[in-house]
Amino acid sequence: MADDEKNKQTKENKQEKPAGGADRRSLIGRLLPWTVIIVVVAVSAGAGFGLGRIFARSATPDPSDPNAPKPAAAGKTTPAENDPEKTLLYEDLPTVVATLNEPGLTRYLRVTLMLKLFQRETADSKAVVAGKSAELVNWLNLFLASQTLEDVRGDRNLRRLQMQILDAFNQVLAPNAKPLIKEVYFKDIAIQ
């Protein structure tokens, strides 16, 4: 019986030792995949950065390079210059004064817009904008009158207004077609 108890104790001790070793293995087994992932990401990022630096070139050719392409002669145009999609025009809209939607206070917003237009072969963009100028100004008056003081304060809000005006104007000018307006600029904006 004493021998049986000794055998049981030695078996239990042996079982406890592998359990401690198994904890170490499981810890290594758990950390190894994460370590490999971190190393692979770091090496990839470093390689991408290094290759980008090696293969990066300036967009302008070096003037001292004899093999560099010569700029186009005056009077000659490149295909990009002939592309009407690339030609840009500017059109001013009349100044719009709107009362802001502020309860208890009378606040005015005065805005003058400049539109950056694409020149299209199928239609003269300036003529289209001039023809629908009354609709654009009307929409702008209604839109600005629905804004509160907080809606027109700050850089983020003004950029949001520009994008909303751009989308709406393009929808008015050319619904379900390519946009005629590339960008909307605030020439003058004043809140009183």
Image (cartoon, helix red, strand yellow):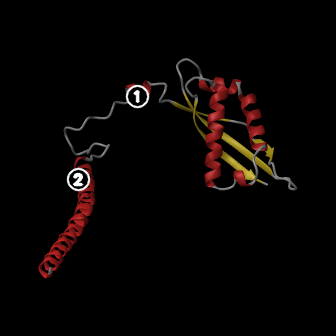
Name the residue nearer the viewer: 116 or 55: 55
List the single residue furthest toward the front: 1
Looking at the image, can residue 133 be seen? Answer: yes
What's the residue at 22%, 69% (across, down)?
A: 19
Q: Residues within 10 Å of mark 2 (few under 14, many from 20)?
A: few
Q: Quadrant of the C terminus?
A: bottom right
What's the residue at 63%, 24% (across, down)?
A: 175
Name the residue nearer the viewer: 70 or 29: 29
Query: Picture coordinates of residue 85 (x, y %)?
Result: 49, 27
Looking at the image, can residue 75 be seen? Answer: no
Indicate the amino acid at tag 1: Ala
What's the residue at 33%, 31% (across, down)?
A: 72
Indicate the amino acid at tag 2: Ala
Taking 136 as reference, is 76 left or right?
A: left
Label 2 residue SS: helix
Q: Which mark is residue 80?
A: 1
What's the residue at 24%, 64% (across, down)?
A: 26
Residue 185 location, quadrant? top right
Q: Which mark is residue 47?
A: 2
List the single residue furthest toward the top: 122
Residue 38 location, quadrant? bottom left
